């Protein structure tokens, strides 16, 4: 009708992304490959983002990555993080490199008031992590420290089951505090032990360069204590050449009404779907069942691999302002 006010829907412009560390070396685990395997497909499958710039060790390396990964010819190539951070056409800086480089690459982006996406762990030390967190908080910047496992379907469904009260009040559990709350630090006791003094050292191509490299990290970790909610928690991590039944991990959560068991095999990565993951519930009334682990049915993950699934969920939640997802991840 003439003269009638017509409301035209607002089309949100995509977030313009600059990636630090996108490899041109192919889809295998070398420096920069994680971005290629997970971040790149997650962004390319989303209408919420567009890649506008890369920053690599040289301009030539960035250009090779642009060509290798089929990015638009207008994508800018940088070798200096300060230039990428100073680009007014970049909204979000993604840092996907080795942890020792996180601080020097994230600080310029935060100083330029950019949104920042950075892989966990945030810094190479507590001091570095606190500095980065402080910079972001001081300017109220939107940031993501990425824990892919917290967006995995198993973790989400498990947390929902616990919060629903299906197994009652929690009595004892082991393994993961994201689902069940933090430790009461005053009750903690722990043992960290190196049982195997040496181990093979691999290069980025997976080849053994030293079959008997001295180890400094423990291969047996025991932690016990109470959670803030009152439940008793016990964590046991070990390194072994093999396990009975090829079971790589088992997580038991006991409550006043029932018990939950999660198990997986030796080759599973927690942050990705895997056929070996099982979730079982036994209620003390006698009911016992296997819980189907479902893949989210949303456009953001429709065409991404299982390896990239959790990353895609995190980026989608961030774009849509899902505060809980952002706090958790």
Image: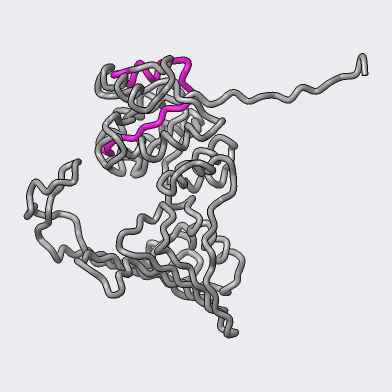
Q: Is residue 38 shown left or right of residue 242?
A: right
Residue 176 drawn at (x, y percent): 41, 61
Q: Nearer the viewer, residue 34 or 149?
A: 34
Instruction: Answer with the quarter of the image where residue 240 lies.
Output: bottom left
> In x, y percent, where is residue 213?
8, 52
Tell me if 295 is positioned left or right of 265 in this view.
right
Between 242 and 26, the residue placed more toward the observer is 26
Residue 132 visible in image? yes
Total numbered labels placed on residues in the image: 0
Whether residue 256 is visible: no
Residue occupying the point 14% across, 66% down: 195
Give residue 280's position: percent from left, percent from top: 49, 72
Q: Is residue 95 magenta?
A: yes
Q: Residue at x 80, y 23 (%)?
A: 7
Q: Which residues are magenta?
A: 78-99
Where in the figure is residue 59, as x and y percent of width and height? 28, 17
Quadrant of the snapshot with the N terminus: top right
Horizontal relation, residue 129 to residue 43: left or right: left
In this figure, which colouring scheme has been used for the structure? one colour
For residue 319, above or below residue 191 = above
Can you tell which quarter of the image residue 135 is in? top left
Identify the residue at horizontal 41%, vertical 58% (top origin).
274
């Amino acid at each position: 009708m003439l003269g009638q006010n017509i409301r035209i829907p607002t089309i949100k412009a995509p977030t313009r992304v600059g990636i630090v560390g996108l490899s041109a070396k192919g889809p295998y685990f070398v420096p920069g490959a994680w971005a290629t395997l997970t971040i790149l497909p997650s962004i390319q499958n989303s209408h919420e983002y567009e890649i506008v710039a890369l920053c690599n060790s040289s301009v030539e390396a960035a250009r090779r990555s642009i060509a290798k990964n089929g990015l638009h010819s207008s994508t800018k190539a940088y070798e200096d993080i300060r230039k990428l951070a100073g680009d007014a056409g970049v909204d979000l800086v993604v840092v996907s490199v080795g942890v020792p480089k996180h601080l020097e690459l994230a600080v310029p982006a935060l100083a330029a008031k950019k949104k920042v996406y950075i892989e966990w762990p945030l810094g190479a030390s507590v001091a570095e992590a606190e500095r980065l967190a402080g910079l972001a908080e001081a300017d109220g910047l939107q940031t993501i420290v990425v824990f892919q496992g917290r967006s995995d379907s198993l973790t989400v469904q498990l947390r929902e089951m616990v919060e629903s009260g299906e197994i009652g009040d929690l009595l004892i559990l082991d393994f993961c505090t994201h689902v069940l709350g933090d430790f009461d630090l005053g009750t903690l006791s722990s043992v960290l032990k190196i049982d195997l003094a040496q181990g093979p050292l691999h290069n980025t191509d997976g080849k053994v360069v030293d079959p008997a490299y001295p180890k400094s990290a423990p291969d047996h970790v025991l932690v016990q204590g109470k959670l803030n909610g009152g439940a008793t928690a016990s964590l046991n991590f070990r390194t072994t050449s093999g396990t009975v039944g090829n079971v790589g991990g088992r997580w038991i959560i006991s409550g006043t009404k029932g018990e939950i068991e999660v198990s997986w095999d030796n080759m599973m990565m927690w942050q990705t779907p895997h056929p070996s993951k099982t979730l079982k519930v036994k209620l003390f009334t006698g009911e016992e069942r296997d819980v189907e682990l479902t893949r989210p049915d949303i456009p953001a993950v429709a065409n991404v691999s299982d390896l990239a699934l959790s990353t895609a969920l995190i980026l989608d939640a961030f774009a849509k302002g899902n505060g809980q997802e952002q706090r958790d991840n």
